[in-house]
Image: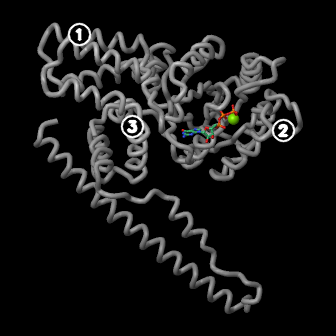
Amino acid sequence: MNNTESDNSREWAAQAYALLKKRQEEQKQELKKQEEQKQELQRQEEQKQDLIDNGIKGNPSRLATITTEPELGEFDDNFTWSAMVLAAQGKKINQISIDEIDWLTKLRRGLEETRKGFVTELLDKLGDDPITPEALDDLETLLIRADVGIDSTDKVISSLRQKLNEEVVGGEEGIKFLKEQLKFIIDKPIKNSGTDLLVPQKGKLNVWLLVGVNGVGKTTTLGKLAFLSSRSNYKTLIAAADTFRAAAVEQLKVWGERSNVDVISNQSKNADPAAVVFDAINSAKKRDIELLLVDTAGRLQTKNNLMDELAKIKKIIDKKVPDAIVESLLVLDASQGQNGLKQAKSFAKSANLSGAIITKLDGTSRGGVSLAVSEEVNLPIRFIGAGEGIKDLRPFNSFEFVEALLADK
Ligand SMILES: Nc1nc2c(ncn2[C@@H]2O[C@H](COP(=O)(O)OP(=O)(O)OP(=O)(O)O)[C@@H](O)[C@H]2O)c(=O)[nH]1
Ligand SMILES: [Mg+2]
């Protein structure tokens, strides 16, 4: 980016900031007004019915909901960067929201650890001078260290080498080319799937199975998905098919309450996961559910095989609702790096997966593993999680991911 472009982007970001600030102020005023009206009404009601002794007081819950919305932070680097990323995707100033800025800031922060050992060094090495073959060797080491994987690294390095053979490539141009190459790798399985963005099909039953080894974040991710789904007005239901872990149902119920989504479960000991799915499908049919989210166990008693269990669940779905649109999403913990990749490979062999969800991108230095998943397991990444909060999950956007991975500040 040259100086003029950079100045224009800052100016754009400043205007976006001013607009969001104004909008937030207006919303706050509006909510304050509503709250005052509500309290006034309540006061009149209390006086009328002389209920003072019953101790019914004004309910502060509404104000509490205001504070759970993200607040517009400072006009700082985080804001400017996030606004620039949105602008680069063609967003207009009046189309951006605090939620989006908040998420991009989280994503960039989440990838900070990966970036530290990678981009900062890379930029130091590349500088403004033309890229040399030695710099390519360094880049290769850095990519491997960020868990990008051997195959993806080989690809990126050989295309960069080819480019260097043809022309002189400066540092800044090298980074731009690198971003394009990384994005190309991540986008390939997404393009091959024929679906750019995974959303439930309206008016149909969509069943999303969340699978993966224990502790990777399946249940948490399901909770966040339930929130996204119900907030987007899909009729949503949760099936608690992890009957192995005693606390799993309780954990799901908490998430279900947060997003106002019912949970179908069977509390009896050693309940059959496929039987829970059976009940959930019956219930989904009765209620015209559009998205049924199925939580599964990450580990089972040795006599049960995880893959057999998943196959049984799938069979039930195919038999009972052959028209349902089924997605088997593998949840992977980014902090497990190459280990996670091994799991992905073994699952992909037997579980007939259709996509991946990468979690725990916050605070790991191994965010590069997302590239290895795309290249080596050939799975489209559908969502990414960067935190334990209900809003810390978003549909995967390769442009934003690569920009956050290679952000230069
Ligand atoms: N920092 C961070 N923690 C996460 C994220 N997603 C999940 N976790 C945490 O990871 C831990 C395990 O999450 P669960 O959702 O219970 O994982 P699971 O795969 O359902 O685990 P099992 O049911 O035991 O197989 C919890 O402490 C979560 O809060 C994330 O994106 N970032
Ligand atoms: Mg779980």
Amino acid tagged 1: Arg
Name the front one of labels 1 and 3: 3
Q: Residues within 10 Å of mark 1 (few under 14, many from 20)?
A: some
- Front disc: 1 or 2: 1
Whether residues under marks 1 and 3 lie with C-beta atoms below 8 angstroms apart, the answer is no
Indicate which disc, 1 or 3, sits on the residue closer to the N terminus. Answer: 3
Q: Which residue has dot 3 on it?
A: 112
Q: Earlier in the sequence, mark 1 or mark 2?
A: 1
Name the residue that disc number 1 marks.
161
Q: Which residue lies under the disc numbered 2?
A: 266
Cα–Cα span, label 1 and label 2: 58 Å
Precedes in sequence: disc 2 or disc 3 = 3
Image quarter in which the C terminus is found: top left
Residue 389 to residue 193: above or below: below
Under circle 3, the secondary element is helix
x then y, percent, for residue 252: 71, 43
